[in-house]
Image (cartoon, grey):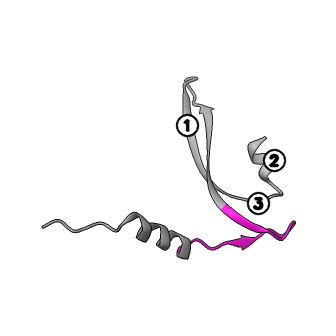
Amino acid sequence: MPKKDRSFTAKLAHEVRTIAHENCPVCGKDRVPVVHYASVTDDQGNWRPQRRRIKLCDCNRKQIYG
């Protein structure tokens, strides 16, 4: 009999417990981890997505999102 995977709510609760929120040294607000997708070109000139996990607060929101 196959092992039952965790439910979505259990996975979400685990993620909330394990992700450490830290305060921004400039504005003092919480820095929230988000996934940022960008389109980049490789050596041959082909486009591909780039996925990065960054911590976002009010200070760097304009730099990230433009």
Image location (x, y in percent) of residue 16: 55, 71
Q: CA distance from mark 2 to mark 1?
A: 21 Å
Q: Which residue is mark 1?
A: 49
Say whether residue 43 is left or right of residue 65.
left
Say whether residue 30 is left or right of residue 27.
left
Which one is nearer the viewer's eye here, 48 or 64? 64
Q: Amino acid at mark 1?
A: Pro
- Which of the image's four quarters has the C terminus? top right
Instruction: State which quadrant residue 50 falls in.
Output: top right
Residue that lies at the very extreme toward the top in this rendered image? 45
Say whether residue 62 is left or right of residue 46.
right
- Which of the image's four quarters has the N terminus? bottom left
Give the residue displayed 41% in from the left and 71% down from the top: 10
Mark toward the viewer: 2 or 1: 2
Q: Which residue is mark 3?
A: 57
Q: Which residue is mark 2?
A: 62
**Residue range (magenta):** 18-32
Secondary structure under tag 2 reads helix
Tell whether label 3 touches label 2 (CB within 8 Å): no
Image location (x, y in percent) of residue 41: 60, 29
